[in-house]
Image: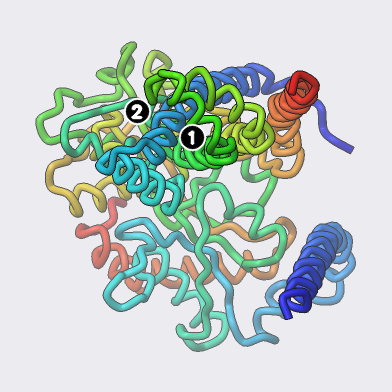
């Protein structure tokens, strides 16, 4: 049976960790969605140098481990005088990393919209950006919702990387509680439950959104 | 052709998944079994017997601590004060200092690893505390350290009082007594805990904190590595290091204590101490 006294005695720590994990996840979610969208459009836009930037970003970032990207922000940039605290460094790393995956998801969504849509929009006088914004992206959104949901769930779980650089998240406090009480299993079961508290509603939310948009199609 | 490849891949995937679940099942079973088995076996076979039977002493040591237990990247060998003590112990029990297996532990993993039987003893700069005595049995003190602070050469921090201020960040490792001590001595400071001291030191070098706190013996090793840092003179705690064994391993503990008395009497201890710390032990 689980030892609930651990949860009760260390409630403050669990709560602080939960709040920070939530905060890091929300910030990284917004940030990575923004960067990811820009990078996806870069990769598709009919301008060569932008294609290169987008491709370089995606291929470079998604092919190195998350923890290394976080270390770049945590110990790499301070070496050249730019310093972030551990929470910020972790959240930035998470944002930059997830953005590469989101860019690919969005790019796939945009490419899945039939070519004729862009051609029709352009020939009715819209500029490239207008056609993208008013015609292509709204259709792409429906396509990308399921894979996007996956990325967001991954993001919440990946936020546990903050624990390694003392980012005061759930994992960090889980480690602390475990090393204080010498209990491993129960402590991390509670940590897992707190993660589920974030990921399951997210998962259900994505599912509901998917169904609603499917109807309107 | 394509289809068969697919089938094979799916088959492989299933096998991998099944064996993974089977493994998980096994490992959790064995740990619970071990607990009950240990009690039964203690009457029949002690850890000391087991060590002699397999002809090898398995010791948990640190791999990331200069002077105490550090993996030398050139030779691949782990070296340090703790290692020399461990080798001497292997010689005492098995008559050959090479009949030893060193396993890497951290402050976080050492007690679980000892209690699940992966290692016979912990010699990893482990401070003897009342809390830990509930989990493991300790030998006599084999090294007396004191907690201090590592700061930048030009820092104006000279005692623990100087870090007891809002906005000062002190770094240390998870699961260490240093973390508890600094929270008690400097309640105003922000304490950040890392996986190990190497990471804490990396963070300090990156300017992520104002001081790193742990036992002075370890800090001297870090200051030796990077001359941009110095150790504050003041120590604000006594940290007696002990060798830990599983609760109830009395035979092994007796041999360890006997061994410690021997090397202190015959001067071997002083030699090891001077070799690593650079000065004679204070009496």
Viewer-nearest residue: B17 or A62? A62
On the image, the x and y values in percent for residue B141 come to: 48, 53
Residue B51 coordinates in the image, percent (x, y): 66, 79
Q: Is residue B277 above or below residue A121?
A: below
Q: In front: mark 1 or mark 2?
A: 1
Task: Locate residue B65, reporting x and y percent.
Answer: 36, 56
Mark drawn on residue B170: 2
Taking A115 as reference, is A65 above or below it?
A: below
**What residue is at 34 percent from the left and 38 percent from the top?**
A46
Q: Residue at x 76, y 67 (%)?
A: B13
Secondary structure under the numbered disc 2 in the rendered image: strand
- Label 2, residues with CA under 10 Å away: few <14, some 14-19, many ≥20: many
**Element type at marker 1?**
helix
Pick the front one: A128 or B184: A128
CA neighbours of label 1 inside 10 A, class few (<14), some (14 to 19), many (20+): many
Asked whether, in this view, residue B208 is left or right of residue B11, the answer is: left
Please identify the quarter of the rendering in which residue B64 is found.
bottom left
Residue at the spot of label 1: A162
Which image quadrant: the N terminus of chain B? bottom right
Tell me, for residue A209, which label it has, or none.
none
């Amino acid at each position: 049976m689980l030892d609930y006294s651990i949860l009760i005695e260390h409630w403050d720590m669990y709560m602080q960790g939960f709040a920070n994990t939530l905060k890091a996840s929300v910030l990284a979610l917004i940030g990575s969605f923004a960067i990811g969208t820009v990078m996806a459009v870069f990769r598709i836009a009919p301008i060569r140098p932008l294609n290169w930037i987008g491709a370089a970003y995606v291929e470079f970032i998604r092919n190195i481990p998350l923890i290394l990207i976080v270390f770049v922000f945590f110990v790499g940039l301070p070496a050249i005088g730019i310093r972030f605290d551990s929470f910020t460094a972790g959240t930035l790393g998470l944002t930059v990393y997830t953005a590469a995956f989101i860019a690919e998801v969005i790019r796939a969504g945009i490419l899945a919209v039939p070519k004729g849509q862009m051609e029709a929009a352009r020939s009715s006088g819209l500029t490239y950006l207008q056609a993208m914004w008013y015609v292509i992206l709204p259709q792409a959104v429906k396509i990308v919702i399921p894979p996007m949901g996956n990325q967001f769930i991954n993001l919440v779980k990946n936020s546990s990387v903050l624990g390694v650089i003392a980012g005061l998240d759930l994992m960090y406090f889980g480690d602390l509680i475990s090393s204080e009480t010498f209990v491993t299993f129960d402590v991390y079961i509670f940590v897992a439950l707190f993660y589920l508290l974030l990921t399951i509603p997210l998962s259900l939310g994505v599912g509901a959104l998917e169904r609603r948009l499917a109807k309107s199609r | 052709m394509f289809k068969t490849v697919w089938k094979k891949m799916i088959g492989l995937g299933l096998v991998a998944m099944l064996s993974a679940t089977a493994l998980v099942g096994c490992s959790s079973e064995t740990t619970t079994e071990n607990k009950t088995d240990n009690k039964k076996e203690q009457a029949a076979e002690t850890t000391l017997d087991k060590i002699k039977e397999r002809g090898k002493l398995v010791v948990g040591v640190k791999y990331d601590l200069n002077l105490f237990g550090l993996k030398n990247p050139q030779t691949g060998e782990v070296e340090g004060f703790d290692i020399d003590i461990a080798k001497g112990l292997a010689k005492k029990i098995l008559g050959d200092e090479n009949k030893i297996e060193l396993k890497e532990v951290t402050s976080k993993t050492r007690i679980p690893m000892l209690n699940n039987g992966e290692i016979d003893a912990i010699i990893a700069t482990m401070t003897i505390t009342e809390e830990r005595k509930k989990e493991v049995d300790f030998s006599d003190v084999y090294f007396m350290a004191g907690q201090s602070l590592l700061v930048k050469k030009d820092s104006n921090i000279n005692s623990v009082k100087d870090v007891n201020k809002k906005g000062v960040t002190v770094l240390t490792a998870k699961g260490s007594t240093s973390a508890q001590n600094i929270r008690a001595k400097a309640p105003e400071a922000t304490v950040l805990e890392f996986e190990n001291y190497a990471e804490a030191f990396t963070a300090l070098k990156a300017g992520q904190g104002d001081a790193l706190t742990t036992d002075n013996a370890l800090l001297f090793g870090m200051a030796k590595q990077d001359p941009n840092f110095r150790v504050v003179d003041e120590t604000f705690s006594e940290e007696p290091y002990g060798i830990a064994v599983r609760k109830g391993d009395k035979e092994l503990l007796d041999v360890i204590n006997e061994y410690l008395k021997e090397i202190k009497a015959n001067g071997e201890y002083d030699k090891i101490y001077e070799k690593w710390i650079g000065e004679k032990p204070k009496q």
